[in-house]
Amino acid sequence: MQENINLNWKVGFVSKKDTFIGEWYPATVPGAVQLDLAKALNYGNYYYAENWKDYGWMEDQFFTYRSTFKKPILDEKQQCFFVSKGIDYEFEISLNAEKIFYQEGMFTPVKLNITSKLKDENELLVKIFPIPKLHKLPADRTQTSQSVKPTVSYGWDWHPRLVPVGIWDETGLLVQNQSEIAEVDFSYSLDKEMKTAAISTQILGTMLQGCKYAMKITDADGITVFEKIAHFSAEKESFTDSIHNIQLWWPHDQGTPYLYSMDVQLFDKNEKLIQQKISKIGFRKVLLIMNEGAWDEPHNFPKSQSVDPIQLEINGRKIFCKGSNWVNPEIFPGIINDQLYEELIDNAIDANFNLIRVWGGGIVNKDKFYELCSQKGLMVWQEFPLACNNYEGSSHYFKILEQESESIIKRLRIYPALSIWCGGNELFNNWSKMTEQSLAIRLLNSQCFKLDPSTPFLATSPVMGMGHGHYVFRDPQTHKEVYEWMAEAKCTAYTEFGLPSPSSVKVLKSIIPENELWPPKRGTSWQSHHAFKAWIDNTWLMPEMLTDYFGEAKSLKELVDNGQLVQSEGYKCIYEEARRQKPYCSMALNWCLNEPWPTAANNSLINWPNKPKPAFYAVKNACRPFLASARLKKFKYTEAEEFNADIWILNDLPHLSEKGKISIKISTNTKEIKLLEWQYDSLPENINLAGPTVRFVLPAWETDRFKLLLEVEGHPEYNSDYTFLYETLKLKKKKANLLNF
């Protein structure tokens, strides 16, 4: 059987290639060279204050990992390999002063047979080149438009310019038999009834002739549903067969994410077990189809292309996708661990999300992410690492893109959670200037069709009909609130939208020096942590807007509470309104779920590393499969003004619902007023219901806010509430007089 051997590493650096390295520092693998040096040189935490700026000089250095090891004990049938799942980004490998390998690309694994080059004492070097830059200036994301390195770390509105390099995934020595299965290519197609899977398997490797293999697929109860035992007659073996009465894999809110185990074993000519590959598989049929009503567009001649299909159909059932955009959970991918993946994915499912969009500006995640999504029933929209650039491409760039995309597709296609391939983020916009004719898009489409034809491919997001934006509660130009612009929108899918808020007081105190903490100011750590000038001027903190709604905040806690209330109410509005717009609309994914470092203000639902904001719980309620909902008109009201709201039932259930009764109430801190009762009938699966409109003239109250309550008799789990700001006529006149004065 195989044996994995960990190595002890040190790291050093020079400014010029192939010059003497005078000092070596302890290194953690997987990790990042920046973190190793920061620890050795006593740098402050990169996420505190302006410390991230101290790392900039590392961009242009040559870093070398060094490990010494004794030759492993090998019998005559064994070989020794150097293996790595990921080295970022351009590197060469030397063994005992001999260069043995070079690669550009962080997503293509490395496996080198070093048996013949081993000595009793060995020195292994992995030399990391400086980060790729198409040009020196401007120092922004356009520097990456000729590389397949993720663009986000070159600076974004929620990510500092801090570009990781180093060994970022599992790496070490592997001792194994010279006969080896290198790849098991498993695919299938389902019959019309989706009860039988026609499977196709190809097993490839080296020195396999005469060896025996045994492939077994077992169900969740351990019962064998397929088995094949045979001997290799060549270096690969191909066969087809069928598995009957299969259980389908479903997203968690539609059924059971049913998984089978696939066990492939290799035996030598003496019937000794020498290798075993175990993986989880699932059977599902996934399509992107035209949204309902989309074929009616355009209405006028010439009758040409309509909006692009973005209705996801799983196993013949149309799914309304509720979810979020996923970004790197850490600036340095090497320190992302299984526990963090699981905690974040559990939170996504707890928020009633069924799909996560892995954004093209970030990394392609480690295997554990996709394993957990498949196990827990969270669909994955996977983008290739292209974002917000024109990847016109040289022949060299296309060679690396082909290499990297092949590695990514082959690694991920086995996971049933994988539901959409996408070329990348915002490539057809006027800042990227790409089209369907761009060679990078054509290449990626071709790669997906060749290597994983059963999974849909989308050129980019957004495409015609889909929406990216808005990203603030109230538009600074038009002054329209989220309630107004969302009700006016008509999109087949809302695949990015955001509403910012400040982070919690605890997070802010951990990243901003005490002397800068209050009040927030531009040019301080508030700005470098994205509260100011992150997107448009004063975003993401939006202090002027908050003052306009609430008055001048008297403390940090008051500012945070106000901002988080606005984010919570705004996100509820968007998710619920998107759901009201189905079946033409089929998807709502906010920007974004998480963040890679602690921001001062951001659109995220979860603060780094995994601290849900109040908006997380608001969105969780807005995404429940069945709930009472209100279409609202605005956020702030004045005494004697008419309040009105349209009442709805939002229903994503995959089965018939029961009938019920809703009580609609207005509540202040001292009073509760019943406005209306609405009895509704049972609903067919996945169908919403529009109900009555309530109207109420607001009386004089001694309060600054009130709530709308929707209470479903006997089912408090379907209840909803909405918070609004309120002011008396006297207060409004006083403010007007102050402004005139």
Image (cartoon, rainbow, N blue to C red):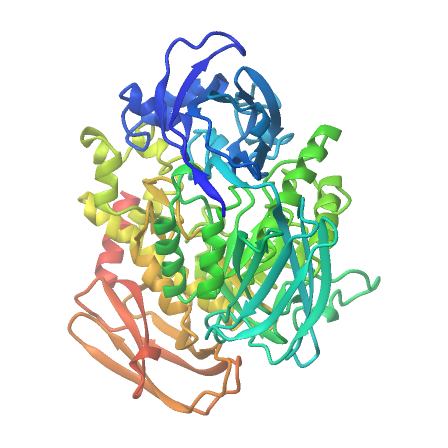
Q: Is residue 11 left or right of residue 688?
A: left
Residue in the image at 61% along x and 58% along y: 420
Q: Is residue 168 visible from the viewing direction of this image? A: yes
Q: Is residue 191 left or right of residue 100?
A: right
- In the figure, residue 435 lies in which quadrant? top right
- In the figure, residue 414 lies in which quadrant? bottom right
Q: Is residue 445 left or right of residue 18?
A: right
In depth, the one of 134 and 714 nearer the eye is: 134
Q: Is residue 333 left or right of residue 399?
A: left
Q: Is residue 428 visible from the viewing direction of this image? A: no
Image coords of residue 168 (percent x, y): 46, 35
- Tell me: residue 304, above or below residue 502: below
Residue in the image at 45% along x and 68% along y: 576
Image coords of residue 449 (percent x, y): 73, 54
In depth, the one of 401 and 542 nearer the eye is: 401
- Tell me: residue 302, above or below residue 533: below
Image coords of residue 430 (percent x, y): 65, 40
- Tell me: residue 445, above or below residue 391: below
In depth, the one of 73 and 112 nearer the eye is: 73
Image coords of residue 16 (percent x, y): 52, 10
Residue in the image at 24% along x and 52% along y: 561
- Tell me: residue 464, above or below residue 41: below
In depth, the one of 15 and 702 nearer the eye is: 15
Q: Quadrant of the C terminus?
A: top left
Q: Residue furthest right?
A: 302
Q: How many discs mark residues in the rendered view?
A: 0
